[in-house]
Amino acid sequence: MPELPEVESLRRVLADEIVGRRIIAAMVTEPRLRRPLSPSLVGRVKGRVIGAINRRAKYLLLDLDTDAILLVHLGMSGSLTVRRDPAAGGALDTRHDHVRFVLDDGRCLIFNDPRRFGLIRLLDRTELAEAEELKGIGPEPFGAEFTIDYLWPLTRGRSTAIKNLLMDQRIVAGVGNIYASEILFRAGVRPTRRARRVTWAEAERIVAITRQVLEEAIGNGGTTFRSYLDGRGEPGRFAERLRVYDRTGQPCVKCRTPIRAVVIGQRSSFYCPRCQR
DNA sequence: AAACATTCCTGCACGC
DNA sequence: TGCGTGCAGGAATGTT
């Protein structure tokens, strides 16, 4: 589920729902995430008030009081939901509710992650800048830094596929497998093309379209491909607007040529062989 | 039953 | 040689 638009959509929901709430208790039923959950987490979050909720790349940053930040990443299959009754899973599978934060209004913030590739870490505000997870991450796609002048030199001399480059979090933050295919379709660039073969004009389009696609996806609450639900348990609506992702064999929305699938860097990639060169 | 929305690590090749 | 960089591949894991 979680590329930038899904995390941003979740951030907005959580900002509405839980800012100002105090965490009165926390429970960990499964600490084995991407990195083992710190044993001190439960004790350290207890009693703290949730302040601003920010996002960096695909990470969520929840201010806890003024001096701590809860860093959350959803990995491949994670979700963070606010529930009145923690046992009432609804569409969610409570077997994989690994961490539960009990709020002072009786609701719970629940981290669920079947594959456990996600991450939760509590940082002192002062450690944030040096946090390993955030250190090498490139500019936010909506930021002033992400421009053709920034991207262009990073494409020069690179033999890796442009799709890999776009998904490299050090290049630009937040683009994952679904949106990379969608961006390159709209830019008219084949995902297998080596980065060094991308022209200036194409790179310009990629910059502009990256912003456009991610923004449109956020506006639609992200993409629900298989199972992703947002913080209120709602599916994202961008799935209906996907033009190539998971559309192998279906006609291209522009030219009716069947969409093709190809594996790049061990990830499925989709493109129109006519519209994308 | 192969595929999967992410990240991290390893090892190899290459260039200076 | 030794070091840094780029790149490919694999692993982590449970579900559909």
Image (cartoon, coloured by chain):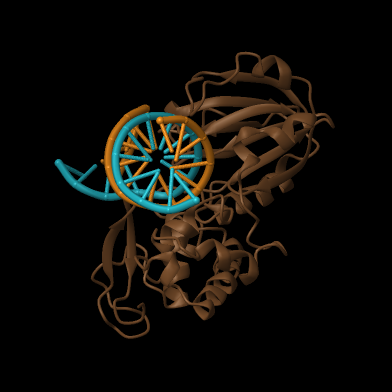
Chain colours: A brown, B cyan, C orange
Image coordinates for residue A125, horizontal then vertical, percent: 78, 31
A177 vs A175, left or right, is left
Quarter of image, res A217 = bottom right
Quarter of image, res A197 = bottom left
A163 vs A4, left or right, is left
Say if residue A204 shows up in the picture.
yes
Task: Say how many tags the image has.
Answer: 0
The residue positioned 63% from the left and 40% from the top of the image is A134
Q: Nearer the viewer, residue A189 or A99?
A: A189
Quarter of image, res A136 = top right
Q: Nearer the viewer, residue A221 or A150?
A: A150
> Could you tell me which quadrant the C terminus of chain A lies in?
bottom left
Q: Is residue A159 above or below residue A107?
A: below
The residue positioned 40% from the left and 55% from the top of the image is A225
The residue positioned 69% from the left and 39% from the top of the image is A61
Q: Is residue A17 above or below residue A186?
A: above
